[in-house]
Structures are given as C-alpha cells and as structure tokens.
Amino acid sequence: MRTDRTSQTSPTRRAVLGAGIAAAGSGLLAACSHAGSQDGGHPGAPASAGSAPNGREAGRAHPTPAEPLRKHTLRATPSPVELGAGRTFRSWTYEGLLPGREVRVTAGDTVALTLANHLPEATTVHWHGIALRNDMDGVPGVTQRPVEPGETFDYRFTATHPGTYWFHPHMGVQIDRGLYAPLIVDDPKEPLGYDHEWIVLLDDWIDGVDGSTPDDVLYQLRKGKPPVGHGNRPEGPVGAGGGALADDGKGPGRAPSPSPYRRKGPKRLMAGATSKLLGGHAGHIAYPYYLINGRTADDPTQFTAKPGDRIRLRIINAGGESAFRVALGGHRMTITHSDGFPVQPYKTDALVIGMAERYDVLITAQSGVFPLVALAEGKGGRAMAVLRTGAGAVPKPSAHPAELDREVLVSARRLGPDESVAMPRRRYDRLLRVKLTGGMKEYDWGIDHEPYNPDTLHKVERGERVRLVVINATHMWHPVHLHGHTFSLAGVDSNGARKDTSIVLPHNKLVADFDAGNPGLWMLHCHNIYHSESGMMTTLAYQG
C-alpha cells in the first residue's frame, strides 16, 4: 500500500543512522557490502577496500575481488595543457592529459584504480553515473576522507551496467580544471551496429588563462564569501576523530579555515547570457575558450571515416557552468542512450546537453567535411570538431550548421526507455520533495532556503520506490544529479527515460522515480559546480 509522505530532514546523522553509526561508518558500510541488487535490479558491487570514512577507521584489507579485474593507476598532477593553436596553460590533469585517458571495461568487470595525488591540495574521484557501493563514491567528508597531497587511495567497484560514464573530483571547484576523463562500460552483447565510435568531451575552459583559476572565479561570484560545499574543509582528518564524519557525541563540526578563494586573475563574470531553450539566464562566467576533446575551434580534433559509415558518438558535457547545443552539419542524429541507459531511438537535428549529462547518438556519414559544433548555449562561444570523409578545407571556427536552429532536444522527457531498462511499473512508497532556492545577485544557492549542511539528511528506506520532486524556485536552470542511482523521468506510470542528471528549467520541476536498492549517503545536487559549492546540494540516507 502506498503511503504519500514527504521525507523529513534530520539535524544530525545520529538521529537517522542510529547511535554509534557515523555517516558511512562501519555499520552502514557493512550494509552496503551485502550481496543482492542495487539501483533497480542491477547486481551490487563486491565488498571493496579503501580508507573507511569514520573516526574509528575500518581495516584496509582487500577482500577477494570479482573477476575479471581491471587495474589502473591514476596520477593527479599539475601539468601544462595545450588547447590548440599554440595556446598552453598550467592546470591540473590526470596523467598530464586533457582529457584524461579513458578507462574502458566490460560490464561485470571489477575496476581497481589507485589514485595517486600529486596535487598541492587534497582531492577525490567521483565515478559519475555508476551505481557502486557508497564508500567508493568519492565525496569528501561524506563517503571518504579527502586524499591528501602525497597520498594514494584505492577505488574498487564492479561496473554493473554498460554505458557512457565519466569521472572527476568532488572537491571544491576542481572539476573546472583539467581533471576529468571518460569511463566507458562496454556491453558484451552490444545490440547496436556501427563502424566507428568516438568519445566527444565538451568543456568550458578558464584555468590558467591570464592567471585565472576556478577558485578565483568562485570568489568573484560570491563576492568573497567562503564556499559552503565540499571545498570547505572539515576541521580535521576524519581518521583522527575530527571532521564532518566524526561522531564524538557532540555532533560533527566544521571549523572555518583560511579561504584559498582570493582574487588573483581578471574579472570573469558576464551579464546578459540568456537562452530561450534554457528558460532565461544561461550562466554567469565568461569563459575564454570552449573545447571538444581538449581542442579549440581554430585547431580542432578531426575524425575520419568513409561515406556511408555508421558512427557512434558518446557525448559528455564535462563543463563547469555551460550547457552546450550540439549538432553535426549536414547530418541528423539518432539518440540511442541518455546517461548510459538505452532509449527508444529518437531522431533530432540537435540536442542540448547540461553539465554532466551524456548522450550517445548514431549518425551515417555523408561525403565531405563537416563541423561538429557545440554552441555554448546563451553565451555566444563555441567548440568544434570535424568529421572528414573526403577532401576539403577545415570549417571556420565560426561555423554554425543550420541543424543548430532546427529541431532541438532540450529535455530527455521526450525520450522513452528501451524495454530492457524500463523501471517496473509500481506506485511509489515515499514522496521526497526538495526546492532549489537562492539567486544570482547574492549567489546564495541552496536547498529549501538553506545552504548545504552535511548533517541535514533526507531519509528513505531500503526497498522503497521513491518519487523525487525537485522544484526549481529560482530564475535559472539547474542540472540536477543524484549519486548512486538512476531515476526514471516520471509520468503517470513512472516509465520515462533512465537518467542520473537532468535539466530543470526555471520555475519548473523534475519528477523522477528511483528504487532505494543501494544503501548509503548519497548526494543530490546541482551540477553547476559553482552552484553546488555555494550550497545547492543535500544528502539522501538509508541503511540496508
């Protein structure tokens, strides 16, 4: 029997998780490692190792991993990046590459990746869109201790569902540097037929240009007010008994620390960026460059094929603050996947992709040279790559294919799920309603008129079908992301496309259903990194 109820927030973790269980502490992690299903029937990850995020630190021994095991080492390091046309800037990258080298596995494989932090600041890795056990989710102060400079951390999880995913830090505004890379999970029974596959990573770039840093940009947006997200460090190492995850009987605290968000570079704020497709304001940061696969439009990446070839494009928006309108000149595209999950094929001329969203599309290559353009929606700039199937000049950086102004998909609500991944039809058990609040003038983004508080939890119960209603009460659009789960864009029968990130337009709402089958502490936040670090995020919590 359905119970229509709105989840209540709790002021402390102890009230929700019980005495002696702090955040993702030993009791909750034990629940996370139980065998069974997670995220609507996908097999759960095996128990994995790493530094447990509590004051009593669980053991670091690795249990026997599932096979096959895919081992990787990932070095986060300061390095120069060359964006094309001789432009070189200092940034932070994985292995000195922009984008980072893809991690590619087959569904069912266990990923064993060691992060080595050679940065001057602490960092983590979040595996965006993957339903994994909670202590591998990479959220500092929530699921793990930050990985300090000079330290390593072992991530281990099973990639249960094929699709297009990616990974990035969840520490402050580090995502707006060069720290991102694709994670591709191949389907051993791939139903699509194509001749080529290309990963298309979109980005808005500011780091190192005339001394700018993402931290400086956040300082400008907030007029010097300190961040209130995961870049605001807890008062001490969790393993030493301090920090946001400690349960010392006095409640977790967050002592203020000297802010690194000092004005260094030139002013990077913009006014008047508007988009009808996004319902009004498009963004507030004047990025100097927009990139596809780390290249600017005047020195683009070129893909080569033969006329008639079928090509799969895996499009990922790794940007910090910009939506992109994407089209390939001279071609229509067929959308086959959204956020890794297959959809009923949908033909369109162009699509809008918010930060952290992914779309897979199929195209049949025509004869000639064609611009693949990612227009920074509402901002005027653009990124470009080139499809070449014959001789001809490279399109100009200002290329504007007619397809950009024809049929444009803005919301995945038009898409239906492939039958293989459609959520079973059932009534929801719990209604969870949150409101996106705040504004551009004060840059005081929050949830339910409050900035992020690590001790505010929204409680659900394992096994419930949860209806999540996110009401956008602001004058700006927000790409909303839920960790650890995919949701179905809900209709009458809860049978919409499967997503983990979805655009919510101003004064509109997201209605999404998910099955609570993956216990832990899971972030729900805006994936505009400057909004989330200003307070637009909260936490869902449940035990096994």
Image (cartoon, rainbow, N blue to C red):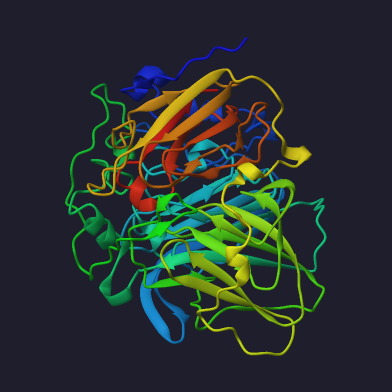
Figure disc tally: 0
Residue under the point 42% across and 47% down: 477
Q: In the picture provided, is 214 more to the left or to the right than 398?
A: left
Foreground pick, 476 / 266? 476
In the rendered image, residue 76, in percent from the top left (x then y), is placed at 43, 63
In the rendered image, residue 400, in percent from the top left (x then y), is placed at 55, 74
Q: In the picture provided, is 198 more to the left or to the right than 282?
A: right
Q: Residue furthest top?
A: 1
Q: Quadrant of the C terminus?
A: top right
Figure quadrant of residue 315: bottom right
Residue under the point 63% across and 55% down: 359
Up-down relation of residue 16 to residue 131 (above or below): above
Q: Quadrant of the N terminus?
A: top right
Up-down relation of residue 209 to residue 432 (above or below): below
In the rendered image, residue 177, in percent from the top left (x then y), is placed at 39, 64
In the rendered image, residue 412, in percent from the top left (x then y), is placed at 61, 46
Foreground pick, 116 / 95? 95
Figure quadrant of residue 144: top left
Q: In the picture provided, is 501 more to the left or to the right than 327?
A: left
Asked if residue 455 can be seen in this view, the reply is: yes
Foreground pick, 331 / 14? 331
Residue under the point 46% across and 38% down: 508
Up-down relation of residue 102 to residue 86 (above or below): above
Asked if residue 97 can be seen in this view, the reply is: no
